């Protein structure tokens, strides 16, 4: 009710300062995909209606020099044909569900299997490949976009009609805030996240091994060779997974730890010490000593997937002309733990009719 009232007010009172869309390209069936430029507090973004994709995110370095720090393309085709989720919204379920199968309330469900024998990031046609409705807004000193997508009952094998709304807000301080919301008409599982590939020195500028990362987590979830959590919450202490104090990402990358060998690098979920919190709390800090750019991430989610760009193989050319090779970017995906539906001991990802799924992640930039 409140939503429909505010929507109609916004439509009739479109403000001059609201973001304005541009045509970006067309899908094979002729569907127009738009690009939405956003700018506030010194941060500039371009967002697509396709996949809610952050096509670029520009921030200054310590000398005020801007660079795009999020990997992306300048045409729609590579997003459709070959994107490893660059900048995309991920749903219905971030990361893997073992064998694309789970049971809920005694009912077995078979999901779209798109990663070996497992289901990854919502299946073959996840939220990253859907066209979202986009509504721009300006509220006080905030500027942003409300993206909505309704996923039909049974889509990619998931039960229930899932109504998802994701709000991207750029604040007057230049922070990028993501608010995720979803409701369902049948019991289901949901785990939404964002798949930006960060390189704080600039997309296409080379390796992120010199970036310093800290993660506020004393444990992580080790995986099997298919990158499915074993169920154990293992201490990071004394392992390459210890990022409690900031260290360069490359420091322990070649130590031959069996978990690093299996994943070709870091591709794991960290169990944030703060757990699930009512408000977003600090999760991780990423710093590039060369440019001076720093990203801080706060969330109310209990987990963080740190993926060190292991599968980037030098075959993709970005919007700025640079090529992306292994370790040329990293993802920090706030989430519930992978494969939660098959691990009753993990925090639950079940959403039931009448409940609203709500999570928030805030990205803060400094130089
Ligand atoms: C996963 C990786 C996967 C990548 C897709 C990450 O979130 O953890 O295993 O390859 O997404 O590009």
Image: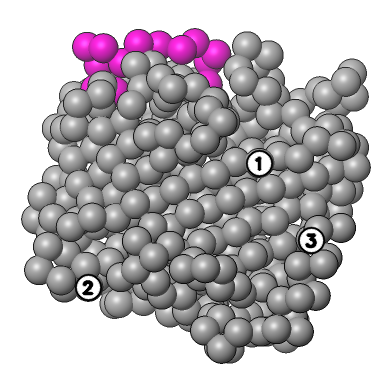
Q: Residues within 10 Å of mark 2 (few under 14, many from 20)?
A: some
The residue range painted magenta reads: 228-241
- The answer to whether any part of residue 255 appears in the image is yes
Q: CA distance from mark 2 to mark 1?
A: 33 Å
Marks 2 and 1, the one that precedes in the sequence: 2
- The answer to whether any part of residue 325 appears in the image is no
Q: Which residue is mark 1?
A: 358
Please name which of the two marks, 3 or 2, marks the residue nearer to the observer. Answer: 3
Q: Residue at x 38, y 57 (%)?
A: 175
Percent of width and height locating residue 98: 64, 28
Q: Residue at x 89, y 18 (%)?
A: 106
Q: Which residue is mark 3?
A: 3
- Side of 129 relative to 12 (left or right): left
Q: Give the quadrant of residue 2.
A: bottom right
Q: In the rendered image of this protein, does residue 37 appear above or below residue 254?
A: below
In the picture, which quadrant includes the C terminus?
bottom left
Percent of width and height locating residue 233: 46, 12
Q: Give 86 or 115, whichever is nearer the viewer.
A: 86
Q: Give 115 or 108, whichever is nearer the viewer.
A: 108
Q: Residues within 10 Å of mark 1 (few under 14, many from 20)?
A: some
| Ligand 1 has an atom within 8 Å of the beta carbon of the residue at disc 1 | no
Please name which of the two marks, 1 or 3, marks the residue nearer to the observer. Answer: 3
Q: Give the quadrant of residue 139.
A: bottom right
Element at label 3: helix
Q: In the rendered image of this protein, does residue 303 appear above or below residue 208?
A: above
In the image, residue 234 lies in the stretch drawn in magenta? yes
The dominant secondary structure in magenta is loop
Where residue 66 is drawn, which disc sits there?
2
């Amino acid at each position: 009710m409140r939503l429909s009232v505010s929507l109609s007010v916004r439509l009739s009172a479109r403000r001059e300062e609201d973001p304005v869309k541009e045509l970006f390209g067309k899908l094979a069936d002729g569907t127009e995909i738009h690009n939405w430029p956003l700018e506030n507090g010194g941060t500039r973004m371009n967002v697509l209606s396709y996949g809610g994709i952050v096509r670029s995110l520009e921030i200054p370095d310590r000398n005020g020099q801007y660079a795009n720090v999020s990997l992306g393309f300048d045409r729609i085709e590579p997003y459709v044909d070959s994107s490893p989720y660059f900048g995309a919204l991920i749903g219905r379920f971030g990361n893997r569900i073992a064998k694309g199968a789970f049971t809920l309330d005694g009912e077995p469900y078979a999901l779209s299997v798109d990663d070996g024998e497992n289901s990854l990031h919502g299946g073959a046609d996840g939220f990253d490949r859907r066209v979202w409705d986009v509504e721009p807004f300006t509220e006080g000193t905030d500027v942003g976009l409300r993206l909505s997508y309704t996923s039909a009952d049974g889509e990619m094998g998931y039960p229930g009609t899932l109504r998802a709304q994701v709000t991207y807000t750029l604040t007057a301080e230049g922070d990028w805030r993501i608010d995720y919301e979803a409701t369902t008409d049948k019991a289901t599982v949901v785990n939404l996240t964002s798949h930006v590939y960060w390189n704080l020195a600039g997309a296409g500028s080379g390796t992120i091994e010199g970036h310093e990362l800290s993660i506020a987590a004393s444990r992580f979830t080790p995986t099997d060779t298919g990158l499915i959590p074993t169920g154990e919450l293992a201490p990071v202490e004394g392992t390459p997974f210890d990022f409690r104090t900031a260290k360069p990402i490359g420091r322990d990358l070649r130590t031959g730890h069996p978990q690093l060998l299996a994943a070709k690098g870091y591709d794991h979920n960290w169990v944030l010490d703060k757990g699930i919190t009512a408000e977003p709390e600090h999760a991780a800090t990423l710093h590039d000593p060369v440019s001076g750019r720093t990203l801080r991430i706060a969330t109310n989610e209990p987990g963080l997937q740190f993926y060190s760009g292991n599968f980037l193989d030098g075959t993709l050319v970005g919007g700025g002309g640079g090529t992306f090779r292994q370790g040329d970017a990293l993802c920090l995906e706030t989430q519930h733990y992978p494969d939660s539906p098959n691990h009753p001991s993990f925090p639950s990802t079940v959403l039931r009719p009448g409940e609203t799924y709500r999570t928030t992640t805030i990205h803060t930039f400094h130089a």
